[in-house]
Amino acid sequence: MLKFIKHNLESINGVEIFPIISLVLFFTIFISYMVYALTYSKEKVKFMSELPFNEN
């Protein structure tokens, strides 16, 4: 089964770029989310954490 997949992938021109693209895309999204999470306002986090306990 693996030989079949490997043989089919070798027939695609430029297939060696796909792992590089996916790694760069993963790290770009991961770093972007980390920056967003670390720069999020502490007041908003506190407000959102208290929402389930508010009755109105």
Image: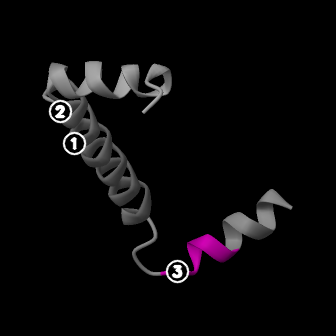
Secondary structure under tag 3 reads: loop
Mark 1 and mark 2 in contact (Cβ < 8 Å)? yes
**Residue under pointer 2:** 35
Front tag of 3 and 1:
1
**Residue under pointer 3:** 12
Residue in the image at 38% along x and 20% along y: 50
Q: Earlier in the sequence, mark 3 or mark 1?
A: 3
Left or right relative to 31: residue 20: right
Residue 34, horizontal then vertical, whole percent: 25, 31
Marks 2/3: CA–CA distance? 36 Å
Residue 40, horizontal then vertical, whole percent: 17, 30
Amino acid type of the residue tagged 2 in the rendering = Val
Mark on residue 46? none
Q: Residues within 10 Å of mark 1 (few under 14, many from 20)?
A: few
Q: Residues within 10 Å of mark 3 (few under 14, many from 20)?
A: few
Q: How is the image coloured?
A: one colour
Q: Residues within 10 Å of mark 2 (few under 14, many from 20)?
A: few
Q: Nearer the viewer, residue 56 or 48?
A: 56
Secondary structure under tag 1 reads: helix
Q: Nearer the viewer, residue 55 or 50?
A: 55
Q: Nearer the viewer, residue 29 or 56?
A: 56
Residue 1, horizontal then vertical, whole percent: 86, 61
The residue segment tinted magenta is: 8-12
Residue 51 vertical placement versus 2 (above, below): above
The main secondary structure of the magenta stretch is helix
Furthest toward the right, the residue is 1
Residue in the image at 34% along x and 28% along y: 48
Whether 4 is among the magenta residues is no
**Residue under pointer 1:** 32
Q: In the rendered image, which quarter contains the C terminus? A: top left
